[in-house]
Image (tube, rainbow, N blue to C red):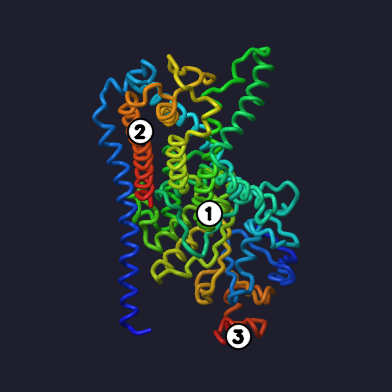
Amino acid sequence: MSRRWINLFTHLFTALTGMACALVILLVAIILGNIAYHGIPHLSWRFLTTAPSSGMTEGGIFPAIFGTAFLVLLMTIAVVPLGVCTAIYLQEYAPVKSKWVHLVRMAIQNLAGVPAIVFGLFGLGFFIEFVGRRVDQIFFSGQLYFGQPAIIWAALTMALLTLPTVVVSTEEALRVVPRSHREVAYALGATRWQMVWYVLLPQAIGGILTGTILAVSRGAGEVAPILFTGAAYYLPYLPSRLNQQFMELGYHVYVMATQSPDVDATKPILYSTVFVLLTLTFLLNFAAILIRSHIRRRLAAAR
Amino acid sequence: MDKVIVENLKVKKGNVAILRGISLTIRTHEILAVIGPAGSGKTTFLRCLNRLIDLEPELKPEGRITLEGVKIYGEGTDVSFLRRRIGMVFAVPNPLPMSILDNLTLGLRIHGLGGSGPITLERVERSLKAAYLWEEVKDRLKESALKLSGGQQQRLCLARSIMVDPELLLLDEPCSGLDPISTAKIEEALQGLKREMSIVLVTNNVKQASRCSDRTAFLLMGDLVEINNTDQIFTNPQDGRTSDYVSGRFG
């Protein structure tokens, strides 16, 4: 091929990739712009701090904001220890190249590919129908306390959904710690657990937080897993116990978009809710990134 | 006085023999140099002594090693305590990505001996002085260990390994990547340390063995060719292969 043709292809390819990138940015800008344009006018302090009223056509979304934050918090408390421990086991304790470990890794990767709605159904079948019912039978002599949709079950279901993210990123962070660092600890007489605690975890904390960030922003955005496991259409009170239902922003959006008695009256509220949901997700992400960079800087100072 | 007695130590990797029956003793308050060309099993020998070889399941040591009469591969050996008694410095300086102080106190924390307080700081100072590093880092103990130069890092690793008062110190080519001045400082430090412990110095550098060891063992292809007082090894070797190696005719 002549030099002229090669140059032509080079320019063409540059233009193509550039246009693809521009298209993505344009789409994001249109979506965000549209939501901001329609959503911001209706925003007010009242909107953020009051409950919906008059069949969702008036009032605010405070219960949904509260429920989302509560849900994500519970989910994080559940998923981070479980995911980090799983990753530590797979990376440090499990015998290398064993069939069992291979199987567990494959299972975790497959978990990441399961549709969210399946997690929702699993949560209903396992947590509520099985675990919750058993708890009620054993501790509450069959009265209905935990055998019903509740924020704890929704959070645990969401934790299962985000588990692969935490496991994979933690494993990645552990894998990059050089072998020589492990040997230092062992040569000083560290047990395996001490090696993990003193050497691996301090170095892996950045990766663990990255996984947590991804899990949190996914958890704040998913609706399907909580559909049957705890999200409520409307609640006159805020959840104060783990076995109560809750309102959630994503689900609230879905409800207002599909079940509203008066679509036109709901529309401005709907836009504002979407705007708040996006902002909340961004803020959560942003906070997590800040924490991570703070820790990275502290680590770098020690480096 | 014999600190460590090694009897017929064999290590195999699959069908390949890495060590073919090593027998020697390590005396108290001596520096035993282990020399030999690359691949002769020096590092493997060293890693058998503190059981770091356990980390490589495909290597199975056979034979008998005793530390003050107690088998280190015996049933119920407390490996953690064993490695507290036997310190190790690696070929490549490997400070952990934390402060100089945290690096030094790691061993104390592992063995539940505290990690702060005046007694710890006293230990830190003593170890750093013994490793000829105190003057250079005394004002920056909270700084990252990775900011130190290569030679300083290796002396920090030396100081770290003697923080828990080992009786035996294993050094695996500790000066292989260092400049002559850093090397001299480490050799000087070893002369001071041997008053308190036994030292096994694996080295690629024949001159280093002749400079600073009391006795020298020559390993070749997994065999112990000769072990004797260092001046004997260098002036009057009994084996032809030894004289070839120490005079630089091969290896």
Q: In the shown orientation, is residue A47 left or right of residue B198?
A: left
Query: Which amino acid, by three-letter code, is at mark 3?
Result: Asp
Count neighbours of disc 3 (C-alpha within 10 A) and say few if under 14, some if 14 to 19, many if 20 or more: few
Q: Residue at x 41, y 47 (%)?
A: B101
Query: Dot 1 lies on which element?
Result: helix
Label 3: which secondary element: helix
Contact between labelled residues 2 and 3, with CB atoms less than 8 Å apart: no
Q: Against A34, is A105 above or below?
A: below
Percent coordinates x, y for residue A227 in the rendering = 52, 29
Q: Which residue is mark 3?
A: B244
Can you say which quadrant of the picture contains the N terminus of chain A? bottom left
Task: Tell me how many marks there are.
Answer: 3
Q: Nearer the viewer, residue B99 or A26?
A: A26
Position of A149 relative to B65 (above/below): above
Real-space Cα separation, disc 3 to disc 2, in angstroms: 82 Å
Q: Which mark is residue A274?
A: 2
Q: How far apart are labels 1 and 2 at the CA level?
A: 39 Å
Label 2 Cα crowd, 10 Å radius (few <14 / some 14-19 / many 20+): some
Q: Chain of mark 3?
A: B
State the mark number for residue A175.
1
Chain letter of mark 2 equals A
